[in-house]
Image (tube, grey):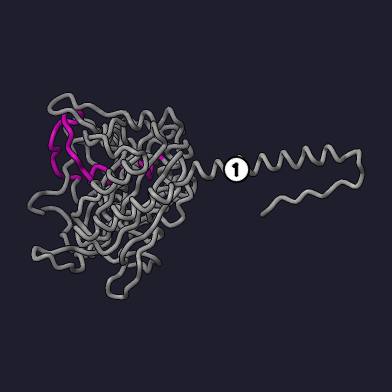
Amino acid sequence: MPVKIKRPSSKATALQYLVLRLFVALLVAAAAVSAQQKSLSPEKRLEIEKAVLSFMSANSVPGIGAAVVFDGEPVWSAGFGMADLEDSAPATSATLFRLGSLSKPITATAILQLWERGKLDLDAPVQKYCPAFPQKEWPITSRELLGHLGGIRHYNADGKGDIPEDSARHFASMEESLRIFAADPLVAKPGTGFHYSTYGYTLLGCVLEAAASQKYVDYVRENIFKAAGMAQTQADDFFAVIPHRTRWYHKDKSGIVRNAGVLDSSYKIPGGGLISSADDMARFEAAILAGKVLKRTTRDVMWTVLEPTEGKPSRYALGWFIAEKFGLRTAGHTGGQQGTDTTFLTAPERRAGVVVLANMDDVNTSLLADEILQIVLDLKDKTR
C-alpha cells in the first residue's frame, strides 16, 4: 500500500513536509533494494527450472516440489509435473510429499530444543525417559541415538522381524512401535561405530514424549512447526483424508511408472513418518538459519559430528549429515521410502538452502539439490 502524506497547510511546516517526503522515499528505495537482494534473478530461476525439468525427464519423475532459501529467507518455490497422474492433478510448492528420513532433522531439532530448555539430558540412559525400552548390555544415550551410534539395528536385509514392505498396519503409540526391535540385541557397543537406524529415532520419539509430557506429533506441531510457520507439515496418516497430499510412484524394471506399494509409517514417525511441502521445508531451513527454533549455540551442538571410537569416521552430527561441498560446509539430509525421494541442503555460511521433494522412489534427488545450490550461489564452476 503506498504511503500518503498530507500536505501541510502553512509555509512554516513546508520544509518539514519536504524532509518527510524525502525520508519516506528513502525508506521505499531501501525496501526495494532489500526485496531485490532477497530474490532470485529471472536468469537463475530459468536455469533452476531447466535443471528440474531435465532431472524429471531423465528419471521419469511424475512430480516435484522445490524451493530455495537465499539470504536467510525463502525466495523461490514451485511445483513441476503431476501430484496425481490418474486425476491429472498438478504438483505445486504446497503439495505434500513423504519426507522419509528428512523427518530425522526435525526430530533432532525438537530433542535439542528440549535439551536447551533443561527438560532432557542428552547423556542420560534412555530408560530415564523411556522405561518401556529394556536394559541392554551397555547403556544407550539420546546423544548416541541422534548420531546413529546407539547400536540399535536398522531394517533387516531379509525383512524378517520388520513391518512388511506393503503394510497398512497402524501403530497407535511409540511404545507399540518399540516392540518391533526392542528385544533384539544391539549390533554394536554404543559409541563405537556408526550404524544408521530409523528405529533408533522411534526410541528417541519415546524419549521426547516423556521429556515433553506430550505426544510427539503435538510437541513438534506446537514447538517446531508453529515457530517456523510450517502450517502443512504433519504425520503421514495413511487412513486420513489429507488435502494436497501427492500420490506415490515407483518405476519398475521395465521402466514403467506404477503406483508404489502401501505404507503406513506410523511405526516410525520420528525417523521417517512426516509429510511436508517444499514451502514448509524451506521455512524450516530459514528458521534453523535464523535461530527461530534453536539458539545458535544449540545449533552448533546439533551440527557437531559425533566421532565413533572405532571404525570409520562419521560425517553425521545430531540428526544431520555434515559435508564439504563446493568449498562450503553444508548441513542437510536425504530421505527415501515407497513413492518418495527427498533432499534438503543448507549452506549456513551463505545463509542459503535448497529443498527437493519427488513423488517417486530411488531417483537420487540429492544430485538435483546440489545442482540447484550451485546455481543459486554461482558455484557451478567449482568441484565438490
Q: Position of residue 337 (x, y in %)?
A: 22, 55
Q: Residue at x 38, y 39 (%)?
A: 109
Q: Residue furthest top?
A: 309
- Tell me the quarter of the picture where residue 85 sits: bottom left
Which image quarter is the N terminus in?
Answer: bottom right
Q: Residue at x 43, y 47 (%)?
A: 41
- Which residue occupies the foreground of this view, 225 or 10? 10
Q: Position of residue 308 (x, y in %)?
A: 19, 27
Q: Is residue 219 visible?
A: no
Residue bearing the label numbered 1 = 31
Q: Which residues are magenta?
A: 182-211
Label 1 neighbour load within 10 Å: few <14, some 14-19, many 20+? few
Q: Residue at x 16, y 31 (%)?
A: 193
Q: Position of residue 364 (x, y in %)?
A: 21, 50
- Which residue occupies the foreground of this view, 70 or 219? 70
| 7 inside magenta stretch | no
Q: Is residue 362 visible?
A: yes
| Direction from residue 41 to residue 250 in the image, left or right | left
| Direction from residue 318 to residue 117 in the image, left or right | right
Q: In the rendered picture of this protein, how many numbered marks are placed on residues?
A: 1
Secondary structure type for disc 1: helix
| Direction from residue 38 to residue 331 in the image, left or right | left
The answer to whether residue 190 is above or below residue 178 is above
- Which residue occupies the foreground of this view, 223 or 57? 57
Three-letter code for the amino acid on which mark 1 is drawn: Ala
- Which residue occupies the foreground of this view, 222 or 5? 5
Q: Position of residue 128 (x, y in %)?
A: 33, 35
